[in-house]
Image (tube, grey):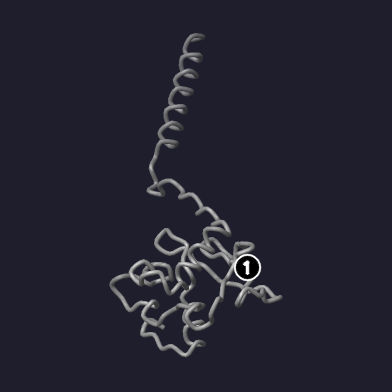
Amino acid sequence: MRRRYPVLAGAAIVTAGAGLAALVGVDRGDGPVPAAPAVPTPADLEATLVKATDPRVPRAEQIGLVEGDDADGPRLAEGNMVLVADVPAHRHRVVDVRVAGPDRVIAVTRTSVAGVEIPSTGEVPFVLDAGAWKIEKAWACTVVENLGHRVRAC
């Protein structure tokens, strides 16, 4: 009988270990946790902002720079989200990026008109849309409407 207890104890340990291994290997369908999107740099956001507001950039290249703006729907580019055309030598320079949520950042901007920098900073919200950082639609619509344009997308 002395031998039975070690054998039973060993069997219990093996069974418990196999059960634990089975639990660890269970796929609950959660899948891997996606990595948080990288916070864009000021240079990244400035490049998007400049491209979206430059009248020399073909409209086809501006598609997708604003949240929800794609080739199949009404485009903000139709309304000339081109600040430079309405305000000569108008330029935004992104000086900082603040995280405003998991899929939203705020680009802190300095604006100059005809080479003269405006003393206060501005804010341009960007959202993660289809894997890319894009100008927030509400902000873009406000800019376009303030410049007197009407856009179907807004």
Is the residue marked by circle 1 packed among few (<14), some (14-19), or many (20+) residues within 10 Å? Answer: many
Residue furthest out toward the right? 119
Position of residue 77 measured from the top left corner of the image (x, y, whole percent): 38, 76
Quadrant in the rendering for residue 22: top left
The C terminus lies in quadrant: bottom left
What residue lies at 50% left-to-right and 14% top-to-bottom?
A: 6
What residue lies at 43% left-to-right and 74% top-to-bottom?
A: 55
22 to 154, vertically: above or below: above
Q: Amino acid at mark 1?
A: Val
What residue lies at 47% left-to-right and 23% top-to-bottom?
A: 12
Residue denoted by label 1? 108
The answer to which of 23 and 109 lies nearer the viewer is 109
Position of residue 57 measured from the top left corner of the image (x, y, whole percent): 40, 69
Figure label count? 1
The answer to which of 33 and 103 lies nearer the viewer is 103
Residue furthest out toward the left? 72
What residue lies at 44% left-to-right and 60% top-to-bottom?
A: 132
The answer to which of 147 and 154 lies nearer the viewer is 147
Position of residue 76 measured from the top left corner of the image (x, y, whole percent): 39, 78
Q: Secondary structure at mark 1?
A: strand
35 to 118, vertically: above or below: above
Position of residue 48 measured from the top left corner of the image (x, y, whole percent): 48, 64
The answer to which of 76 and 119 lies nearer the viewer is 119
96 to 38, vertically: above or below: below
Quadrant in the rendering for residue 93: bottom right
